[in-house]
Amino acid sequence: MMVTLVAASGSPGVTTTAVGLARHWPRPVILVEADPTGGSGILAGHFRAQVDQPGLVDLVIAQRADLLAEALPRLLLPIEQTNASVLVGVRSPDQAAGVAQLWTPLLDALRALATAGTDVIVDGGRLGLNGWPQPLVMGSDLTLMLVTSDLVSLAAARWWADSLVAAELPGHTSRLVVVGEGR
């Protein structure tokens, strides 16, 4: 199974929710940090900036040598005492455009892992940004769009929700998750 979490606007907690899901996932799972804004919120937050781990940029280099599937397992950072590992994202928004070429071949590699019994959770960040992981979003089994409960966030989510539903492929489902005060 492949689940992608995204936001239509703001910062409703996509990364926090993705990490929480991955930490408590009942089966082996890979958390892909595909947010194009960079800064690796997972390394900074969950790992408290105590770990330096290669990730998507190194995977781009491997893809150029047609070695993506072989390199992927080596680039995963295990989350101790869980069934989860993390594929670390870009370090700056400047890297997003270069990583965008990776999304389609990475989708194929992740699909192969999912077929072999390892689930995938993707932190897709905000929809529509330069380098956003559209192939991962559209190729997942389930897309969860997180929004806060204020009217501005809900209004911003409406267009994206309609767009995601209209683009659904067979076997893909999109849902809205409302988080925060007043849920």
Image (cartoon, rainbow, N blue to C red):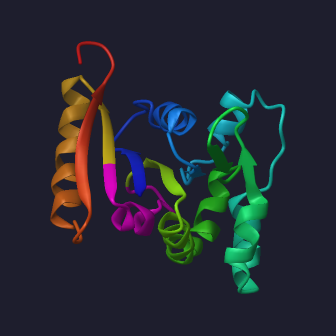
**Residue at the (51%, 76%) spot, across then down:** 108
* Placement of 160 over or under 41, stated as above or below: below
| Image location of residue 42, percent across then percent down | 65, 37
**Residue at the (22%, 66%) spot, across then down:** 168
**Quick one: 156 or 168, which is closer to the camera?**
168
> Is 37 covered by the magenta stretch?
no
16 with respect to 134 (left or right): right
**Quick one: 125 or 79, which is closer to the camera?**
79
Q: Which residues are magenta?
A: 128-143
| Image location of residue 177, percent across then percent down | 27, 35
74 with respect to 92 (left or right): right
159 with respect to 99 (left or right): left
| Furthest residue in direction top, as rendered | 182
**Residue at the (77%, 66%) spot, across then down:** 58
| Image location of residue 127, percent across then percent down | 38, 52
**Residue at the (30%, 33%) spot, across then down:** 147
| Image location of residue 126, percent across then percent down | 42, 47
Residue 39 visible at all: yes
112 with respect to 159 (left or right): right
Looking at the rendering, in which quadrant would you find the C terminus?
Answer: top left
**Quick one: 175 or 147, which is closer to the camera?**
175
